[in-house]
Image: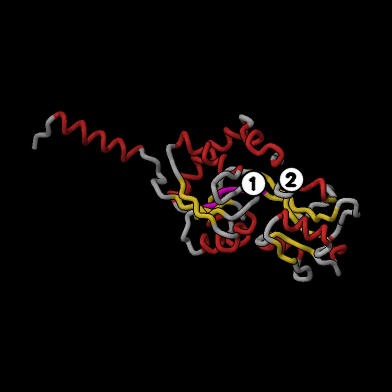
Amino acid sequence: MMINAGVRRVLLACVFLVAFSPAWGEGIRVAVPPLANLLEKDHSGVYQRLVAQALEPLDAEIEQVFYPYRRSLKAFEERRVDCIFSLTTVLERRYGEDELVQSYPLGKFVFYVFTPAGQPSITSLDELDDRVVGGIMGHEVYLKPVLGENHGLEQVRTEEQAVRMLELGRIDAFIAAMPDIRPFLDRLNYSPEHPLMHSFDRLNCHNTARNRAFIQALSGELRKLKEQGVYEKEARDLYLPF
């Protein structure tokens, strides 16, 4: 059967588009847990802005679904989303390296114990015994392996609420992450030499061929942004060098 030149050109164009279209296709769904100033419901968080810039040259989009901490983790575990922001250390413990694909880091964080300004800092977990210690709701998934079974946390919703409770004497100390807590540091005391743990926030995805292609492309662009100083520019006081 003869095919005229016009039809042949259309067919070749279709083959080209299929062959060279992004391997991840459309519809990458991402769970977004709350991280003050870093991950926000209105997509204004530092990490969300970095990912948006990294996606621009890739001509790709993601669908962000905002959940509380536990619900975002459950949505990922039930595969109702392809990927999830943050919770990297928790996912590594639950899944192992073979079941996850992870992006280039979006940022670094460090957990510390905070006390009111003017009071002595806490330098060991033993000093938490017999004290009422607060923790940001959802952070217990990070902290339980560090604190063990003997240290429960009085859960608070936000860093701002934790600071108020501390100043009112409703809690004796609280555990929070740097850089999230930085806007309140002038009202707090802590020991920089005694972190509880540190890790990196990443975009974490189920290990599928589509997600591997997506994360590989995204990571390349994120690395460029980091090298160009965009991370520090976007995060400002929330930037921790790495």
Decide: is 189 above or below 56.
below
Left or right: 58, with 39 as reference point:
left
Looking at the picture, tell me which residue is in the foreground, 46 or 222. 46
Q: Which residue is mark 1?
A: 37
The numbered mark, 2 or 1, whose residue comes first in the sequence reads 1
Q: Position of residue 131 (x, y in %)?
A: 84, 67
Q: For the C terminus, which image quadrant? A: top right
State the predominant SS element of the stretch in magenta: strand
Q: Answer whether labels 2 and 1 touch (C-beta < 8 Å).
A: yes
Q: Residue furthest left?
A: 1
Res. 134 image quadrant: bottom right
Which residue is identified by label 2?
183
Relative side of 137 to 2, left or right:
right
Measured as percent of width and height from the top left, residue 236 is found at 68, 37
Residue at 65 percent across and 50 percent down: it is: 36
Q: Position of residue 240 (x, y in %)?
A: 71, 41
Q: Marks 2 and 1, how far apart in space?
A: 10 Å
Q: Provide the residue span drawn in magenta.
A: 200-205
